[in-house]
Image (cartoon, rainbow, N blue to C red):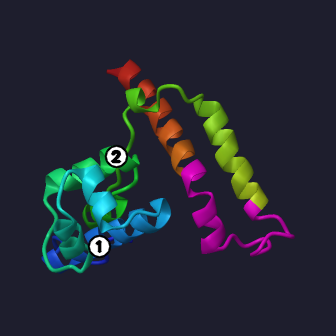
Amino acid sequence: MTASRSGPPTSDEYRKAVSAIIRGIQKGQGLNDRQLADQLGCSPGTIRNAKSEATSLDPILLLAIERGFGPGAIDRCLALAQVRAVALPERVIGVDPILALVEALHRLVEAQAVDSDGGKRITRAELGKILPELRQGRASLDALIARADDGRS
């Protein structure tokens, strides 16, 4: 997921990352091109072109993806800069951060159980099933860290 070379990302790398983001969202949310386009406020052709790597996606649409689908939604793109998105503390309102972390850890322990699909080794499919809990746990932890950082300013 991270850029392996030291130079700046290329347009091809950016387009591949955006395509993977769109495909992942569509698969995870069960959305077709039109439905995703409606949510993002663009045309289905824009989604199709970005998904097929024919054109670059406007950064405003990337921001709409991150905002609409949550922190981490565009991490494949941000990985080209060797960074990732972090939720602001106010974005995690209504979620008890400790419970979110415990839930994520609980799901990881279940996935690593001897009788799970992958046994002691967590499979990609198992991680995919618990991705929402992992993202919520990460967002909660990031929010706690941001709150602690705000106190030091």
First reached walking from the N terminus: tag 1 or tag 2: 1
**For the magenta stretch, what is the residue range?**
111-134
| Three-letter amino acid code of the residue under disc 2 | Gly
Label 1: element kind:
helix
Q: In this view, does 110 lie above or below 47?
A: above
- The mark found on residue 19 in the picture is 1
In which quarter of the view is residue 19 placed?
bottom left
Q: Is residue 116 above or below residue 54?
A: above
At a point 66% along the width and 67% down the height, the residue shown is: 126
Q: Quadrant of the N terminus?
A: bottom left
Q: In this view, does 128 lie to the left or right of 40?
A: right
CA separation in Å, label 1 and label 2: 17 Å
Q: Position of residue 124 (x, y in %)?
A: 60, 73
Q: How many numbered marks appear?
A: 2
Label 1 Cα neighbours within 10 Å, binned few <14 / some 14-19 / many ≥20: many
Does the magenta segment cover residue 7?
no
At a point 13% along the width and 59% down the height, the residue shown is: 58
Q: Is residue 91 above or below residue 110?
A: above
Label 1–label 2 contact, CB within 8 A: no
At a point 32% along the width and 56% down the height, the residue shown is: 83
Q: Which of 56 and 11 is in front in this view?
A: 56
